[in-house]
Amino acid sequence: MTIRTLVETYYNTQVRAFAQSSHFQRLVSGQLSTRDIDQFIFNLCQAHLKSPQILAFLYSVAPPSAAATLQHNMLEELGLDDEGICHPDLLRQLAIATGFDAQRQQALENAAQEQLRTLCTDPLMFLTIKELGLSVLLEVTCFEWMLSQLSSHIGQALNTHRQLSPESLEWFTHHSEVDIRHAEEGVVAVMDYVTYYEIEADELETILDITFRENIFIKRYFGSLANVKGGRIGLAQEAHILESAR
Amino acid sequence: MKITAATLIALRIPFVEAFTHSIRARRYSDSIVVRIEAEDGTVGYGEAVARPYVTGETVASCLAFMANTLWPAVQQQDYSLPPLSDTNDADESMSMNWVQEIAATLPTQSSSIQNEHDCPDADETASPTVVAWNAARAGWELALIDCLLKASEQSLSSILPPRRSPITYSGVITASGIEQAVKVAKRFKQFGIPHLKVKVTGTDDRPLIAAIREAVGPDPSLRIDGNGAYTVESAIATCEKLAEFNIDSAEQLIPRGAPADLAVVQAASPIPQMVDESLITLEDADALIEARACQWFNLRISKCGGLAQTLAIAQRAEQAGLQLQVGCQVGETAILSAAGRHLAAWLPAVEFVEGSYGKLLLAQDVSRSPIHFGHHGHAPLLTQPGLGVSVNDDILNTYAHQVISLSN
């Protein structure tokens, strides 16, 4: 199996498991309560608000052949490219449209910052930045892979079931377009990274296995939403389904 | 110091991945957190993990024993604060006495006090024979130690001065088929974990261990754990088959029973035997030593009835020249992991340490700072007051399956 095929297999498994999950299905079919939808929006914004910083990290560890792409993505996220659309601001716009008051907006900013802090303070499992960088790159590009396929569905669901205006959902519209390009570039960046840092196929597969041992989309978007009496147990079951599917 | 209120919180925190051994598969943590409040407002946390196939306790019966027997006993006490820390032996002895005194306030048998707190299904789910209310007592003992140490702004490390740092943790490979086991073994190799324990079931043991040894190479130490799935004969035969893979110990291959049976396995096997489910009480420890039933003791704080009794068992082992592993409960949160780390740091000799998996296993842990080990299985000492973890009550509330509030 080629590196591309291997990586795409993991990405597709992640996206399929997410799309088929009860969490996603309840979202797009309008079965989530307004409160749960708002928590989903909070989680989504929290997951992506600091994307420029994550891309800056990836830019700093990128091999020369992928550096320009990652730099462009970072500038694009910040709105410093030709289009001039700051992606975190689109998320803030979404949060305001959802009705988050000043206190909740601040809580969102704090939660997003806390995720960056956790990345720095959690004990490192890998020996070097090389492995950590690959794991982060895989997760980021897998998100682009998913958003290129499901972003518009999510946006549509929020429009239909939460009555959010198309303007407030621009983040989803934008990602459904740009992430088709990003998804392809992401896989190329992974291949370049693996080649540049001379990562063996067996090691790549292990890092893929570690990075995707649970569904990253359910974890990031629904992690704090469902409680133990319902969906949280479903999360473990879905992790098991994912394992079985591999 | 009087304890004025307590809350028993039965948790259900999902696992990131299922954990399987020969007896059962687990998908979520079912720990019970004991949250107590002292008269000065200090809050302490303890944790119990009830296992019907180990001590006979279930979550329901454990909650009932905690609420109906331990809480009334704790209410009556006026606890002394720990002695101020110093490093000389006399003070260490005083510190040990303080821990023993706390444990002595916790009844070992059901009281005749009328049950005020009905716990649904307690009778239905209770094991017919509770060997000892060790998990229940451990949960309360740890909460008291945490609370009283915090009240005097001391760390448990002042009571149990650490002898080593960092602590090196083992990885555990669950019984989930050879392909998955090899995947997990490769993860641990990537993480530089130097010690691995493999759950064995009696099915495909040799190809499983051969595949894992090939995946991780010759350097990591390997141990096996049977959770009582074998007979005396099959245990000996299994050890003979697996010895070529350089196995350090074989844990609890046969079920808890007569120490003489274990002694037969120990005498005939090329792999040193470790006891786990067979080692619950001090009387167990004495009988196992007397029978020369093993070379290793697996100490687990919840299983062994708390810190005081675990220390007493460790002392017996040390006198008998046995080797020690500090084990853990699958699904334990940062509270029990912290207590285990203090124990592992203090013991004069400990070969293997398990636990502190935190968010490596749990979807979310209860502590504000991560407890889990890092590369090479290394984790630092905990130096903050009490057990050294700051518990997030919001997370307890999020994952609470059952809550029992107790007050004067």
Image (tube, coloured by chain):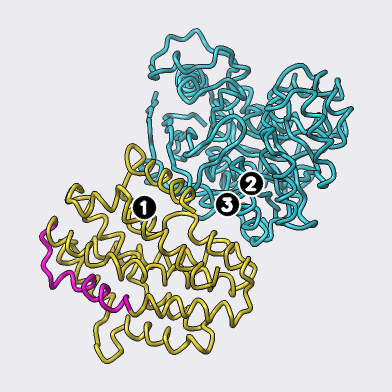
Chain colours: A yellow, B cyan
From what the image shows, is residue A98 above or below residue B406? below
Q: Secondary structure at mark 3?
A: loop
Q: Is residue A166 magenta?
A: yes
Amino acid type of the residue that numbered disc 2 sits on in the rendered structure: Ile
Whether pointer 2 and pointer 1 mark residues with C-beta atoms closer than 8 Å, the reply is: no
From what the image shows, is residue A197 above or below residue B47? below
* Mark 3 or 2, closer to the camera: 2
Total marks shown come to 3
Residue bearing mark 2: B178
Q: How many other residues sit within 10 Å of disc 2, few (<14), some (14-19) or many (≥20)?
A: some
Q: How many other residues sit within 10 Å of disc 1, few (<14), some (14-19) or many (≥20)?
A: some
* Mark 2 or 1, closer to the camera: 2
Residue bearing mark 3: B384
Percent x, y of residue B342: 66, 45
Amino acid type of the residue that numbered disc 1 sits on in the rendered structure: Gly
Q: Nearer the viewer, residue A1 or A36?
A: A1
Q: Nearer the viewer, residue A91 or B207?
A: B207
Residue bearing mark 1: A223
> Which residues lie in the magenta part?
A162-180
